Image (cartoon, rainbow, N blue to C red):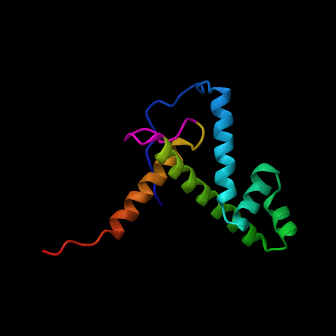
């Protein structure tokens, strides 16, 4: 399991976010959610935004509890990947900093995804022949 170190000092206050910026981020977030495959989007929206418990989700979708849990987890993972891609494209990435505006993707989660991608690239990199 990938881990990352927490910064020495964590912010004690949340930075003020411009209302217009927040509205723009909300629109982008909704577009990203809409790009998720239907089963994952449906599971994520019902649990995260409509407040259904995973047991209720399983009953509503007529699937097993483990199937409901899998869909929610996979939806979260895909959403994190998509948000990180968006942030890297839109905001760039400076080493040691979060690639996203504060609060869009938690810094630790974003850094874990960056580390995970780097490791995957190394594994997929062809070996040099000497």
Quick one: which residue is furthest to the left in this view? 130
- Tell me if residue 3 comes above or below residue 40 in the rendering: above
Quarter of the view holding residue 62: bottom right
Instruction: Please provide percent x and percent y for residue 5.
Output: 43, 44
Q: Residue at x 69, y 35 (%)?
A: 23
Residue 77 falls left or right of residue 93:
right
73 or 4: nearer the eye?
73
Residue 41 point in image, percent of width and height: 72, 60
The kind of secondary structure the magenta stretch mainly shows is: loop
Q: Residue at x 57, y 50 (%)?
A: 83
- Whether 58 is drawn above or below 35: the answer is below
Quarter of the image that includes the C terminus? bottom left
Q: Position of residue 128 (x, y in %)?
A: 20, 71
> Which quadrant of the view contains residue 12?
top right
Estimate the x, y position of residue 97 in percent, counting from the top left: 43, 38
Residue sitting nearer the eye, 46 or 83: 83
Left or right: 122, with 39 as reference point: left
As displayed, is residue 121 above or below residue 126? Answer: above
Q: In the picture provided, is 85 more to the left or to the right than 69?
A: left
Q: Residue at x 56, y 55 (%)?
A: 82
Left or right: residue 12 compared with residue 29 = left
Range of the magenta residues?
91-102
At 37% from the left and 41% from the top, the residue drawn is: 95
Q: Is residue 118 magenta?
A: no
Total marks placed:
0
């Amino acid at each position: 399991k990938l881990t990352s170190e927490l910064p020495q000092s964590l912010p004690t206050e949340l930075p003020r976010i411009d209302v217009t910026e927040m509205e723009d981020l909300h629109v982008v977030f909704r577009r990203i959610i809409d790009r998720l495959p239907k089963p994952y989007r449906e599971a994520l929206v019902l649990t995260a935004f409509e407040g259904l418990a995973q047991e209720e989700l399983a009953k509503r979708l007529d699937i097993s509890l483990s199937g409901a849990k899998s869909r929610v987890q996979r939806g979260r993972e895909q959403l994190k990947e998509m948000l990180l891609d968006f942030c890297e494209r839109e905001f760039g990435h400076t080493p040691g900093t979060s690639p996203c505006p504060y609060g869009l993707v938690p810094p630790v989660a974003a850094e874990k995804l960056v580390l995970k991608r780097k490791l995957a690239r190394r594994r997929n990199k062809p070996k040099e022949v000497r």
